[in-house]
Amino acid sequence: MGNILVFGASGQLGQCLAHVARERNTPGLQFLPEDQANILDLAGLRAQFARYQPSYCINCAAYTAVDKAEDEVELARKINRDGVANLSQLCAEYGTTLIQISTDFVFAGTGNQPLVETDASAPLSVYGLTKLEGEQVVPGYTSQYFILRTSWLYSEYANNFVKTMLKLGQERDELRVIWDQVGTPTYAIDLAGCILTIIETQSREFGLYHYSNEGVTSWYDFATAIFELSGTTVKTTPIRTAEYPTKATRPAYSVLDKTKVKTQLGVVIPHWRTSLQTCLERLQQAVSAA
Ligand SMILES: NC(=O)C1=CN([C@@H]2O[C@H](COP(=O)(O)OP(=O)(O)OC[C@H]3O[C@@H](n4cnc5c(N)ncnc54)[C@H](OP(=O)(O)O)[C@@H]3O)[C@@H](O)[C@H]2O)C=CC1
Ligand SMILES: Cc1cn([C@H]2C[C@H](O)[C@@H](COP(=O)(O)OP(=O)(O)O[C@H]3O[C@@H](C)C(=O)[C@@H](O)[C@H]3O)O2)c(=O)[nH]c1=O
Ligand SMILES: [Mg+2]
């Protein structure tokens, strides 16, 4: 399979890839954190490509602070668009397949039907817009790519909604959580598994794919499930988006249709509740072991 370069290795998905690669004994992965490989530094990246001659490049690096991006447009665009352009250019030069990760936030989310890859994008936020720009630069350099749009990532690694809820559940008597944003949580470990499956099967079905866990929920129902399955007692009140003001506007409905990834790449996707249970068990084991 050759070398597989992972950029943004110390982020959530990067750490999940390391976890799954260990479990599966996948050879060849080279994990490059930001201090060894800044995706804005084309010369530095070229040195890594020259050294490893990679068959695959997995880009887990991104600017992911959704609200902060509204005030840091240029930095978000540099990382989410120009960084992707740099990697795409080098993938073209080295015959490397690019695996790029994108987001449900490329959609406006005004509909009520699961979104397919060909549905019109119309981002509501700087984060969503710059991620869409990142998708759009890739085909200008190479046709050898997989772009996986995913949603609501969580895991036992880095910061995410599940870990935030568990922490706030301990600290507070009551939590107020939005019920009128509907989507699907995705266990980043499952997404990492999908990425490694694409590589292991050496799929040539290049293109744009949607990947999340199965099922549909709201942030409120997700929070409720986190508390129920972890045995946390905390009063959880459903609120509307308007009652929780944030800098960035988020889509009201961003459920992704996974038909394409399932039929063309043959991946099997767990339901979000099953994967949530797995994650909570692993978090619990980590607490007990500590
Ligand atoms: N988290 C989510 O809910 C979702 C994420 N996604 C997408 O999935 C992918 C992975 O997200 P996730 O792992 O959760 O995000 P994280 O924010 O956990 O990880 C991103 C990593 O990229 C690093 N990074 C930032 N700038 C650069 C740079 N110039 N060069 C190299 N590395 C850099 C960050 O470092 P530092 O922290 O030091 O800045 C961080 O370690 C991203 O493309 C994201 O847009 C899609 C849908 C949902
Ligand atoms: C902490 C908290 C959040 N919320 C809401 C705010 C928001 O609408 C939702 C989730 O909060 P977060 O801050 O985790 O949301 P956010 O960081 O916007 O999550 C997004 O991140 C980017 C990177 C993506 O690509 C998206 O798919 C999505 O996962 O829950 C509450 O209603 N109550 C609360 O107490
Ligand atoms: Mg940084």
Image (cartoon, rainbow, N blue to C red):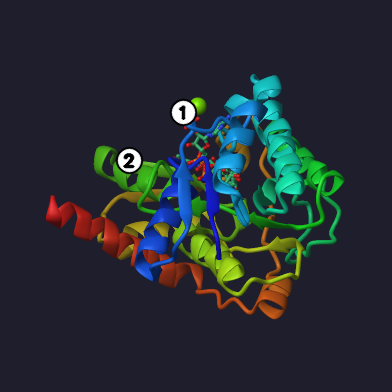
Write the residue at 81% across / 41% down.
137
How busy is the neighbourhood of tag 2: few (under 14 within 10 Å), some, or many (20 plus)? some
Relative image position of residue 76 (x, y in whole percent): 66, 28
Q: CA distance from mark 1 to mark 2?
A: 32 Å
Q: Which residue is mark 2?
A: 168
Up-down relation of residue 191 to residue 265 (above or below): above
Up-down relation of residue 216 to residue 241 (above or below): below
Pick the front one: 169 or 138: 138
Relative image position of residue 13 (x, y in whole percent): 48, 50
Say what secondary structure mark 1 lies in.
loop
Quadrant where the N terminus is found in the figure:
bottom right
Relative image position of residue 236 (x, y in whole percent): 39, 50
Q: Which residue is mark 1?
A: 35
Relative image position of residue 33 (x, y in whole percent): 46, 37
75 left or right, relative to 17: right
Write the residue at 72% across / 77% down.
264
